[in-house]
Image (spheres, grey):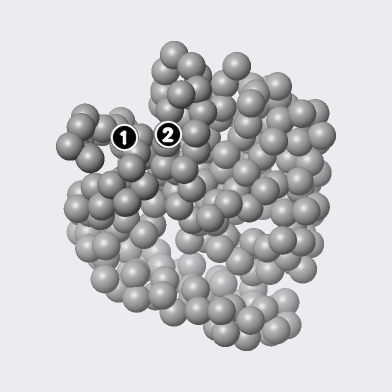
Amino acid sequence: MAIHVIADLHLQAEEPAITAGFLRFLRGEARGSDGLYILGDLFEAWIGDDDTTPLHQQIAAEIKALVDSGTPCYFIHGNRDFLLGKRYARKSGMQLLAEEYVLEAYGRRMLIMHGDTLCTDDKQYQEFRREVHKPWVQRLFLLLPLFVRRKIARRMRNGSRAANSGKDWTIMDVNQQAVTAVMEKHSVQWLIHGHTHRPKVHTLTANGQPASRVVLGAWHTEGSMVRITREDVELVAFPF
């Protein structure tokens, strides 16, 4: 048996190939596994559970079918879909997890998270993140009409692209001290995260022992997952 971990699909109506690849994954390899963990940015943007677009309904139905088949599905919020709420989670059958979650499976303790909080050198982003995660800001945003939220989200995505295009790539990567600190906080030797779109298995030292950090890739031109079994923790790229 195996557990699968994915992140950064950035599903949107404008990218039907990625959606199709995800559906094949749900109906194929994910079916019958011990669990599917989605570490955020499942969607390119999420402006509220009341945004019942056809894509959102289709994905909810497909994940619910996976769960009903016997494979539990878990979700950690990303920076793009941090507003995904309990209503959509119930509809899709997903269980919402804390932003830092220790997964214990097959004799290993592994910390799983989206990964944006590790990018502490990007001061501009971290300040923005603190603002939009304030409960009163989120409540106020969700009170706005849906068409207004769509416009705001579109403007924010365009602004994010423009800001990131001018940043050094090292600023937008994880800070090694932040990585070590969070692994020692949770007493783990394994960390799995997404967000940076730089798939790789890194070796490091944490808690005074050899440790591993596994970074998931984004689903741009191919799928990316971590397959966890009793024997191995494997980073796998696969065609849509």
Viewer-side residue, 54 vs 42: 42
Task: Please give the name of the residue rendered at 50% of the width and 22% of the height, measured from the top-left corner.
Answer: 106
Q: Circle 2 — which element?
A: strand
Residue 172 horizontal/vertical position (percent) = 28, 57
Q: Which mark is residue 29?
A: none
Task: Please give the name of the residue rendered at 63% of the width and 81% of the height, measured from the top-left corner.
Answer: 139
Q: Quadrant of residue 72?
A: top right
Q: Relative to 66, is 149 above or below?
A: below
Residue 45 horizontal/vertical position (percent) = 58, 61
Q: Quadrant of residue 44?
A: bottom right
Q: How many marks?
A: 2
Amino acid at pointer 1: Gln
Q: Residue furthest top?
A: 231
Q: Circle 1 — which element?
A: loop
Q: Is residue 20 visible?
A: no
Residue 116 horizontal/vertical position (percent) = 38, 57
Q: Is residue 146 visible?
A: yes
Q: Quadrant of the N terminus?
A: top right
Q: Which residue is mark 1?
A: 189
Q: Is residue 185 left or right of residue 19?
A: left
Q: Relative to 179, is 159 above or below?
A: below
Q: Relative to 165, is 137 above or below?
A: below
- Work out how far the residue at label 1 is from the one at label 2, CA to CA, in angstroms: 7 Å
Q: Which residue is mark 2?
A: 109
Amino acid at pointer 2: Arg
Q: Quadrant of residue 236?
A: top left
Q: Is residue 55 left or right of residue 41?
A: right
User: Quick one: label 1 or label 2, which is nearer the N terminus?
Assistant: 2
